[in-house]
Image: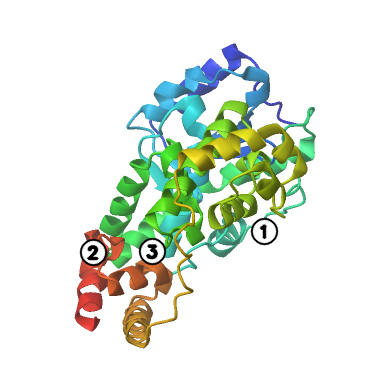
Amino acid sequence: MIAPITTATDLAAAAEKLGGGAPIGIDTEFMRERTYYAQLCLLQMAGTGVALCIDTLALGDLGALRPLMAAAEPCKILHAARQDLEVLAPVVGALNNIFDTQVAAALIGFPAQIGYADLVNELTGTHLHKSETRTDWSRRPLSAAQLEYALDDVRHLLPLREQLSERLDKLGRLGWFAEEMRELGTDSFAIDPQEAWRRIKSFADLDSDRKRLAQSLCAWREQRAISSNRPRGWILPDAALRDMVFQLPRDKSALAQLRELPEGIFQNSGAQLLELIDAAKVPDPAPPLPPRRRPDPEQLAAVARLSETTRRTAQQLALAPELLVTRREMEQLVNGERNSSALSGWRREVIGTALLSAL
């Protein structure tokens, strides 16, 4: 059994061993069911001839890894990296020189969201057992089976990178992949409570007064969730937020009538919520809610044309259509928006110009 790293001395030694410039594989195990921020429970890393688990709960401080993660070399290989990067950012900082095997696989024709185990099986013929999928990674001690399962998630990343790089090169798509990785590397995981209202799609078409209230209520919830490190739904469920914005309760009696507002939240935070509603100064009577939008036949026809153009192009390139442009992006193009990723970088040449011609 490989014992996890639990001391600062061993962590520093591991960082030195992995810092020689050769690529390293990285994966995380975390929990976020009961917290706002993901709780990093285990960090797995693999280099040439070495694979190790770092017990992040035992260590607490992972500062010894920051220089390694920020360095231009080695290359850091992850699968479906975005979530891991979000989890790692608060404890080791931003990672430099990332290779996302899921993105690379999509660019050579695999499904856009192919899983790690499926990709390992396809490219190496190795079947990974997923017997520990439901593990509570915050519990200690971890069993030998759990550690082996965790290490399997990094052991195959180096050979995957080699095969994927070769195929990308043969297809002339290394430039595409480099663009995708540059974009991934610039992602910010900073949270702006004032923008939290945009998460709820039904708020997008509201009048300006209700939008102002939605922004205020969502910012309050986000700030409370951050400060208490609890899931935002524990602070105030989405359904209760919608009820407040749509129904505009202006006193305790009206607030208590909202079916989706839990009693405990009403008792503990009802007064604050009413203050926020009052401060938003939504007129009384309020503007009518926007009517349910009926699909516009011309817009539907335009989206259908873009969809067909995308399907044909994707078929020619042997790529998943959603990798080129999503349905939402097509709708935005039809509505006149021009900041779509389909109109920049490699996608503009491959599909963007054709989409504009099809409008």
Report the mark closest to the observer, 1 or 3: 3
Is disc 3 placed on a helix, strand or loop? helix
The span from disc 2 to disc 3 (Cα, nearest Å) is: 24 Å
Q: Quadrant of the N terminus?
A: top right
Residue underneath mark 3:
107
User: Which comes sooner in the sequence, label 1 or label 3?
Assistant: 3
Q: Viewed as shown, does residue 4 lie left or right of 319?
A: right
Q: Amino acid at mark 3?
A: Leu
Is disc 2 placed on a helix, strand or loop? loop
Label number found at residue 338: 2
The span from disc 1 to disc 3 (Cα, nearest Å) is: 23 Å
Which residue is painted at 44% across and 44% down in the image? 281
Label number found at residue 65: none
Q: Is residue 349 placed above or below 240 in the rendered structure? A: below
Q: Amino acid at mark 1?
A: His
Q: Is residue 113 placed above or below 330 in the rendered structure? A: above
Report the mark closest to the observer, 2 or 3: 2
Residue nearest the observer in this picture, 214 or 339: 214
User: Which comes sooner in the sequence, label 2 or label 3?
Assistant: 3
Which residue is painted at 28% across and 65% down in the image? 342
Q: Is residue 36 placed above or below 245 in the rendered structure? A: above
Residue 35, by quadrant, is top right
Instruction: Give x and y (percent) for residue 115.
Output: 57, 58
User: Which comes sooner in the sequence, label 2 or label 1?
Assistant: 1
Query: Is residue 291 among the parts visible in the rendering?
Result: yes
Dot 2: within a 10 Å radius of its alpha carbon, few (fewer than 14), some, or many (20 or more) residues? Answer: some
Residue underneath mark 1:
127
